[in-house]
Structures are given as structure tokens and as C-alpha cells.
Image: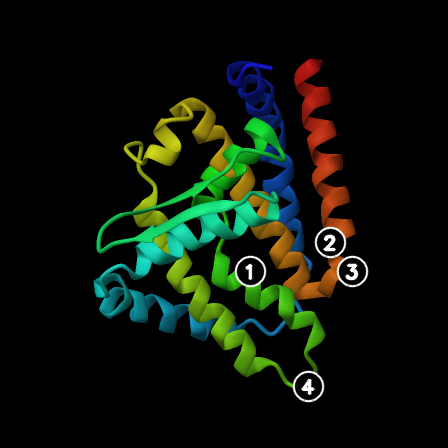
Amino acid sequence: MPAFFVRLVLGLGFLALLPGAAGALWGVLAAADGFGWWPILAGLAAGTALYVILLRRVPGFEVCEHELTHALVALLYFRRITNFSVKRDHGHVIFLRGFGGTFGDDMIGFAPYVLPTFTALLILIRPFLHGPLWWYDFWIGVSFGYHLFSGYRELSPRQPDLASRGLLYSCLAVPALALAIHGALLAILVNGYAGVPPWAAQVWAITVRVVAFVAG
């Protein structure tokens, strides 16, 4: 099937997903009153300062993290990576086409703009840890402080990853995917892996209600 038609269907899907992903993320936050947020907030402030003062000035650091995210998601789609290049102000990852087709290509392309790589890795490990985790949550906050501001700097209509796929399509895909991914990660952070099914059910329920309302 031509990429245009695949992206047309996906674009409509992302549009439908937007309210569900946003509502479910807010639902997880609203139900997390008992979670200890102060280490994460302290880490967020520290991560922001670290990024502004140091990391954004380190040659190639942001480029490396950007290309690493492309590469990690490419591996999740069982793509063979043939070239990984990082230079001071640009880089690239070349991978073979394969599993997922156009959808897989787009998820790999959008990955650095929707996936907080370091934060995601820390959150995915957290449910397996025991004892007081304030120190670990602090580093989750630090990593998210970096991702929050580096991701904002990367978002631009001139980014080839976005422009090559069409700006309208990208403007639907990036926020929908970002809200969904951050909502799932937040559910794991607050409730462990058991929090993912209720979060997914809420995404689905809100999405169905909105689509039914629009359809009329």
C-alpha cells in the first residue's frame, strides 16, 4: 500500500488518539496523590540546570542521544542498523527496511521527539527495585529535565524527520505519541506494570466516547 494512504489512515488514528491519551495521562496524575513527587521535582530542577549550564554545550551530546533513540527503536522493529554516525552538530542512523513497513519507519523517525529515552529506561527498571527509592526517583527527574528541554529545542518544522513525512501528519503524530508514551510511563512509575492495563482501558474508553460524539 502506498505510504500516502498508510499515513492518511494513521493520521486519522492519531487524531482520534489525542483526547484519549491526554485524558488518561491526566487521570493517572489525578489519582497519584499518595505518590512522593518531591524527589522527582527536585531532580527535574537539577536536570534542567544541568542541561542549561552544561549538557547543551557538550559537543555532540544531544546529537548522540537523538540518534541513539532512533537506533533503539529501530532495533525494537527488528531492523538491521548499517550505519550510526554522530558528529558535532549532526548525525544519522541508517537501517534496513523490514518489519512494520511505513508504520515502523515513522515510529523510528518520530522516536526522538516522543520518547524520553533515559527516563524511559529508568522507569522500566524501577518496578524491580526495592526499598526507599527517593534517590532513584531523583535521577528520573534529572533525566526528564534533560529530555523536556532538549526535546523542545529539537522540535522544528525544518527537522528532516518531521518535514519529510508531512507537517500536518507530524503535527498529529508527535503529540499523540508523546502523550501516549508519557502516560504509559507515568502509569508504570506510579503503579508499576499493573498500572498499564487500567491506563490503556482509560485511553480506549475516552477515545471511543470522543469518536462516538464526533460521529454523532
Q: Amino acid at mark 2?
A: Val
Spot occupied by residue 131 in the image (x, y as percentages of width and height): 68, 86
Q: Secondary structure at mark 1?
A: helix
Q: Residue tagged by mark 3?
A: 194
- x then y, percent, for residue 7: 54, 21
Residue identified by numbered label 2: 196
**Mark 3, mark 1: which one is toward the viewer?**
1
Residue 64 vs 49, above or below: the answer is: above
Looking at the image, which residue is at 72% across and 65% down?
192
Q: Nearer the viewer, residue 21 or 35?
A: 21
Tell me the quarter of the image containing the C terminus. Answer: top right
The one of 58 and 27 positioned closer to us in this rendering: 58
For label 2, the SS is: helix
Mark 2 near mark 3, Cβ–Cβ under 8 Å?
yes
Residue 131's label in the rendered image is 4
What's the distance in space between the residues labelled 1 and 2, CA to CA?
Answer: 14 Å
As helix, strand or loop, the secondary structure at mark 4 comes to loop
